[in-house]
Amino acid sequence: MPEQTFRLNGEQVTVDIGDDVRLLWVLRDVLGVTGPKYGCGINVCKACTSHLNGRAVNPCAIPVGELTPTDEVTTIEGLADTVSADLHPMQQAWIDQDVAQCGYCQPGQIMAAVAVVRRAAEEGREVTDADLDGIRNICRCGTYVRIREAIRAGAENM
Amino acid sequence: MPGADRPAPPSSGSPALGRRRFLGYVLAAPTLVTAAELAPAEPARAESAAADVPSADVTELVDLNDVMSAAALPTSGLITVQVHTDETVSFALPRAEVGQGITTSTAMLIAEEMDVPLANVRVTLADARPELVFNQLTGGSNTTIATYTPVRVAAAVARGRLLEAAAVALDSAVTELTIRAGVITGRAGRSTTVGALAEKAAALRTQRVSTALKQSDRFTVIGTPQGRIDALDAVTGRKKFTMDLDVPGAAPTMVCRPPTINGRVGSVANADEVRAMPGVTDVVVITTGVAVRARTFGQCIDAVRALRVSWKPGSAEGKSDETVRRELAAAELPLGLPPLTPSVEGRFTFHFRSNSALETNCAIADVRSDRAEVWSSLKAPIVAKEAIAARLGLPLGAVTVHVTEGGGSFGRKLFFDAALEAVEVSRKTGKPVKLMWHRADDSRQGRTHPMATSRVRIAHVGDTVLSYKQRHTSVATDLGHGFGELLTAMAAKLPVADLGFSETFFQLSQSMPYDFGVSSRLLNETDKGFNTGSMRNVYSPDVTCARELMIDKLASKTGKDPYRFRRDSLKDERSRAVLEKVAEVGRWGRVMPDGTAQGIAFHSEYHSASAVLVEIDCRPGTIGRPVRDGVTGPRVTKVVLAVDAGLTVNPRGLEAQMMGCAMDGIALALTSSLHLRDGYFLEASWDNYFYTRQWNTPPELDTVIMPDTTGKPGGAGELGVAASMAAVACAYGRATGTMPTTFPVNHGTLSFEPKPTTPPVPQSPTDGLDHAY
């Protein structure tokens, strides 16, 4: 069985599993990291959104064999550690705006939100309505309006 | 923070003058446990019929919520509040939390009545409890209506017991004690805590006691906006849904499903070959397909795709939107002879829609020879437990059904399709399984809101309406999760004894809020070949949408303003008040550019009233916005909702529900439907089924919660869907100059390339790294 090695939420992990198994299943079914959720398995719903080396990606569409030992995967569980706090400012904004309803899509929404704000910051601008319109993550409870409010509030503190 | 300076009356002794008392229990237990019967016993509400015209409205005598509440009376079990030595208070709610916020609102009731901090109240979901009979069904927006009083009674009994124990501990009279934020203070400032008294207040034997409830003018928690009690867990990934649970040995399991709806397995050509694939442990044929169990779901997907199965026909073989349309036309009940007076008439078609939640159907099962244990988000867990026991041939007591937190429901979790499959696979493999539907399965084989037509005729003289007739014809809605039993039990007590289940449900949930003379609404159903169920707000979005569009048409014909016409026709003050509120806040009638318009609509149900005003932009530049693999179309640019849900426990939660209802209404009116071709639904992905996305989300949304005039909670989890859908439809009609008659309005355009049906699930992409941002 091939060995897969990468960094997960600040720690080196090694897993015995085939190269082609998508990262989502390695996280959830093998490593028991269940923050990233399954919603489609074809990179459409974005419920599994996590970060790879600080960029938003969807683990359902990444064969684990493509990761290298220095690749850093951050799931919702590791987000707060990236700012050395109990909560990342975006998580706090989510709580302040009472965004979550069922909560199933929320880890993915928050990870996407952080990436959208970082991208805008790197481009030296504020988050725009077009940025928010472009977020593809589905929320079937329809808490979209609060998601938009939380992203703007969270961006202030990032 | 909760806090009240005055003590409650003791839990025994003479009742305070003029204050209603309730019976509760103190149960024998090591720490304080109090209980109440889950029996709200709300009398059916008799409302006066329209003054001069007889009306046949069943809902004016009794509505669905009264039935759901009254059905509980003779058989209800106890719900219990437990006080722990660590200062927490716990309660196992016999309902399903699927996002609607009932664990939070329930915790608020307990915090209020006991004067303990909200953060110290832990609300979990109760396992299936058959002794509760009809009282463990989450639906009909009934949770708060049915549990508001019993939960408070149990909490009030606990408060009384704690005060009695504190009186001894603090050497004070009960009347000298104050309780605030879980701290009880007596004479000379000596104090103790709820946790310190948890054992002292416990009972050696079960007693029945009477208690009064806190009066509403002393509320410090109920009616205040509170964030959800599970918010921290939700944003940190700690919230556990069914598939996140670690049940020893339960391995990922998926089912290879037929290419057409409810097809059956003929034979499997390569089971041994698939069994030898990486990670795969089992391949077994079950009722609904071929199940594969593997180390990961990814390997399940590989195995499902590799299976070569010959299939037998399904239950909708060869059917399409067009054939169902013809079936519906053939089943339509007549509207009768044309009236002698002027009239307006309309016919509306509503296509199949999916109530698939973001969490697909899923369940964990561990079936042994003599027992079974199941974990799933279930809104009718007693029915599920009974069905599972029957399927396995086990006694009811040998089956344990845990109700887990649900990742959305929208009616889907009234059923337990995945749980039944999971126990079948677990029995056949002899191993625990973690069974999950693929998204493609959830969309194509999962339950739907049935396709329907609604015909409306309004007879009038000038602007006076003489009669209103609506004939709703629908593919059958499966109510087999328990509403059917419930209504059977109650049927003899209702003036609808000659009606079937569905028609009874329809009559109980639909009402005529306008003074429209002789009013009649009838449902006829056809074709039981589809997997259907009660989708959020059930019949109301379609029925209300048709009605409100016809009101716009009549207003237009008679030269009246759509808002004024509604306002002048609504029967009661609460209804008029919500409509007036959205017109005022939304600035009804403001001048808008061509291609944009306002729409306004009203809906009442669940002892609540709602009105919605929207603004829509149907200009080419908006409709043509490019979004990859998405539908943009007209954009709702503003939504104003006004809601009167009676006494509101958590306004912040109510606003959240109304926001979700608005997003549902937008999707139902404009973008979301299933296309039926050759016996299967074409949609297999969220980029096929166009639920509201960020690019469809209104930039402006305003929810107004009306002051309570009833003192009692109404239902609200589904309330806003109907008026939202109707308002969007009305706005679309006014912006484009053409009343829409087919929903969603874009159904005629297929906006995606359908995925193959064999293999039944798509492979996961491998290019994820290319899309990093």
Image (cartoon, rainbow, N blue to C red):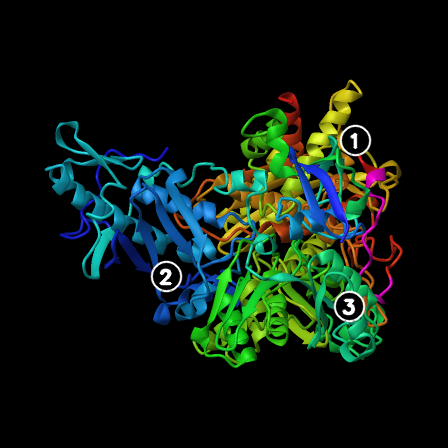
Tell me which numbered mark, 2 or 3, is placed earlier along the sequence.
2
As helix, strand or loop, the secondary structure at mark 3 comes to loop
Residue B38, numbered circle:
2
Q: Tell us which disc is closer to us: 2 or 3.
A: 3
Q: Secondary structure at mark 2?
A: loop
Image coords of residue B129 (percent x, y): 42, 67
Residue B746 as seen in the image, left or right of residue A30: right
Q: Is residue B462 left or right of residue B623?
A: left
Label 1: chain letter: A
Q: Position of residue B380 (x, y in %)?
A: 52, 66
Segment tinted magenta in the rendering? B756-770
**What residue would you read off at disc 3?**
B276
Number of the front mark, 3 or 1: 3
Residue topped by disc 1: A130
Query: Does residue B646 show up?
Result: no
Whether residue B624 is visible here, answered yes or no, is yes
Q: Amino acid at mark 2?
A: Leu
Q: Residue at x 79, y 31 (%)?
A: A130
Majority secondary structure of magenta residues:
loop
